[in-house]
Image: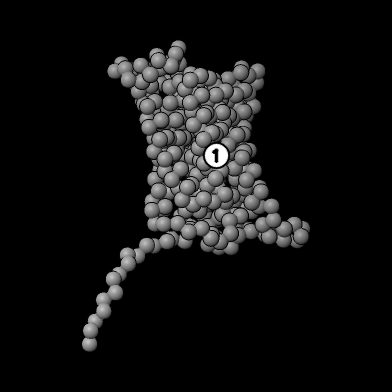
């Protein structure tokens, strides 16, 4: 027992476990997209956390299976994060920033569950296209991104050594802008995906016409915000990657290229469910890489440029 406790306190395998928890939360997010795309959000009725009033549904329909699977995965994720919090506190000293990140993971996981309850209890599921659903959807996905960022930082900081990178003061500002813009990209992307599900377009030209039609629902008229925010976020991410030139920055550039391809395919194929899930997977991996790169930029040694001062010769 003492050997096991010493192994836990030593933190051996902790970073690998944190990476597994991060990977599992990505799976939960992807399955959540399946719930939305298939209109299965009300598969457990107006009950939360129970499913149709039971712990385990009896004779469930397909929508119930999909929704119950998502809730079960969320429950497993809660247990995994709880273990991660305890292990991190046992293995890391007081004041360690990995401790702070993992605490935020627990807090954001709690708010994630509460927001999921709001969606179900408020009826903001299935074919609900109200303005309130748009708002709740944006808040919910923003919280999801922050949760994934906290888990990413926990994993990243558990294995990060002292930074040897050097960056200018501008890099820090660009890092914050890239993070903020990408959060907007994620929130508006969830709305665009919901609009594609509730109001599918027969063709690309018809979809573009809907985006700017005065009588179109708010969901449809908000779709243009997603590519507009993506341009700003990706431009900042590219600038930051080229400035740092670290290994994580190279991975970020590769994922940016993949996102261009996946985003274009999503539009051209009129956003089928499998393409939406694949595009979301690419977005999640891009967000993880961006958080890691921004962490490098914010912890890098700052290079300050001082103006050259002319030498004044004084005569005696």
Q: Is residue 217 visible?
A: no
Residue at 50 percent of width and 24 percent of height: 266
Residue at 55 percent of width and 48 percent of height: 248
Q: Is residue 6 above or below residue 258?
A: below
Identify the colour scheme used.
one colour
Q: Is residue 299 above or below residue 199?
A: below
Residue at 63 percent of width and 58 percent of height: 90
Camera-nearest residue between 85 and 292: 292
Task: Report whether 6 appears left or right of 97.
Answer: right
Q: Which residue is mark 1?
A: 254
* Position in image of residue 8 (x %, y %): 69, 56
Query: Which image quarter: residue 43?
Result: top right
Q: What is the quadrant of the C terminus in the image?
A: bottom left
Camera-nearest residue between 150 and 316: 316
Label 1 crowding class (10 Å Cα cut-off): few <14, some 14-19, many 20+? few
* Position in image of residue 29 (x %, y %): 55, 33
Q: Is residue 29 above or below residue 274?
A: below
* Position in image of residue 201 (x %, y %): 44, 15
Quick one: which residue is furthest to the left in this view? 316
Camera-nearest residue between 45 and 110: 110
Q: Secondary structure at mark 1?
A: helix
* Position in image of residue 313 (x %, y %): 26, 79
Task: Report whether 77 appears left or right of 182.
Answer: right
Q: Is residue 222 visible?
A: yes
């Amino acid at each position: 027992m003492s050997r096991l406790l010493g192994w836990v306190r030593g933190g051996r395998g902790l970073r690998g476990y944190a990476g597994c928890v991060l990977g599992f939360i990505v799976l939960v997010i992807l399955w959540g997209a399946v719930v939305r795309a298939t209109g299965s959000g009300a598969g457990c009725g107006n009950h939360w956390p129970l499913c149709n009033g039971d712990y385990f549904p009896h004779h469930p329909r397909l929508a119930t299976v999909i929704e119950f699977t998502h809730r079960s995965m969320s429950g497993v994720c809660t247990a995994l994060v709880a273990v991660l919090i305890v292990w991190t506190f046992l293995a890391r000293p007081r004041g360690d920033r990995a401790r702070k990140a993992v605490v935020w993971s627990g807090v954001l996981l709690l708010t994630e569950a509460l927001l999921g309850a709001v969606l179900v209890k408020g009826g903001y599921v299935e074919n609900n296209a109200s303005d309130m659903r748009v708002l709740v959807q944006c808040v919910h996905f923003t919280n999801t991104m922050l949760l994934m960022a906290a888990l990413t930082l926990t994993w990243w900081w558990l294995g990060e050594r002292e930074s040897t990178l050097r960056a200018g003061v501008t890099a820090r500002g660009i890092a914050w802008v890239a993070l903020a813009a990408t959060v907007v990209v994620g929130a508006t992307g969830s709305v665009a995906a919901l609009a594609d599900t509730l109001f599918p377009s027969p063709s690309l030209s018809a979809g573009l016409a809907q985006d700017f039609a005065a009588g179109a629902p708010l969901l449809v008229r908000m779709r243009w915000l997603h590519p507009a925010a993506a341009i700003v976020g990706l431009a900042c991410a590219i600038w930051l990657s080229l400035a740092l030139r670290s290994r994580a920055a190279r991975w970020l550039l590769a994922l940016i290229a993949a996102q261009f391809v996946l985003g274009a395919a999503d539009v051209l194929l009129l956003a089928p469910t499998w393409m939406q899930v694949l595009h979301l997977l690419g977005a999640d991996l891009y967000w993880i890489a961006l958080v890691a790169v921004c962490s490098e930029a914010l912890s890098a040694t700052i290079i300050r440029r001082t103006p050259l001062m002319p030498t004044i010769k004084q005569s005696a």
